[in-house]
Image: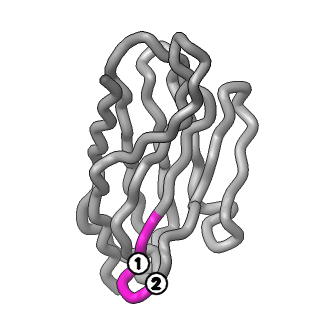
Amino acid sequence: QVQLVESGGGLAQAGGSLRLSCEVSGSGFSINAMAWYRTAPGKQRERVAIITNGGTTNYADSVKDRFTISRDNAKNTVYLQMASLKPEDTAVYYCRVYITTGRGVVSDYWGQGTQVTVSS
């Protein structure tokens, strides 16, 4: 069974930094791409950043040059380093991972979400 556990959210001041982590546990699968999404109040969920298993990254324009996604394959963990935070970054952040099982089935899983609040 695949489980995702997120950590690292909280309160930050504008201009500050936070780092989110998402650890994937379980067995019998390989992890492909890993991504971070967010849902801000009154807005649709948007993808913030994604990283492939080869290390290629892609960012939403709103976070480019401020956020950095990375992964530690040995730990099955994806990180989101957030810097120069803005009040509009306030949202619930979710990790999403794409997994291939031993039978070749590709599935995606979501973390439980972690709140990030940026005060002005």
In the figure, residue 25 lies in which quadrant?
Answer: top left
The C terminus appears in which quarter of the rendering?
bottom left
The answer to which of 74 and 33 lies nearer the viewer is 33
Q: Nearer the viewer, residue 51 or 97?
A: 97
In the image, residue 76 lies at what x, y percent? Answer: 44, 22
Q: Coloured how? A: one colour
Q: Main secondary structure of the magenta part?
A: loop
Residue 61 percent coordinates (x, y): 71, 70
Q: Which residue is mark 1?
A: 40
Query: In which quadrant will I find the N terminus?
Result: top left
Disc 1, disc 2: CB below 8 Å?
yes
On the picture, is 89 further left or further right than 34?
left
The residue that mark 2 highlights is: 43
Check disc 2 and give the amino acid type: Lys
Q: Which residues are magenta?
A: 38-43
Q: In front here: 25 or 108?
A: 108
Q: Residue at x 63, y 47 (%)?
A: 50
Image side of residue 86 versus residue 4, left or right: right
Mark 2 residue element: loop
Q: Please, what is the three-letter code of the amino acid marked with disc 1? A: Ala
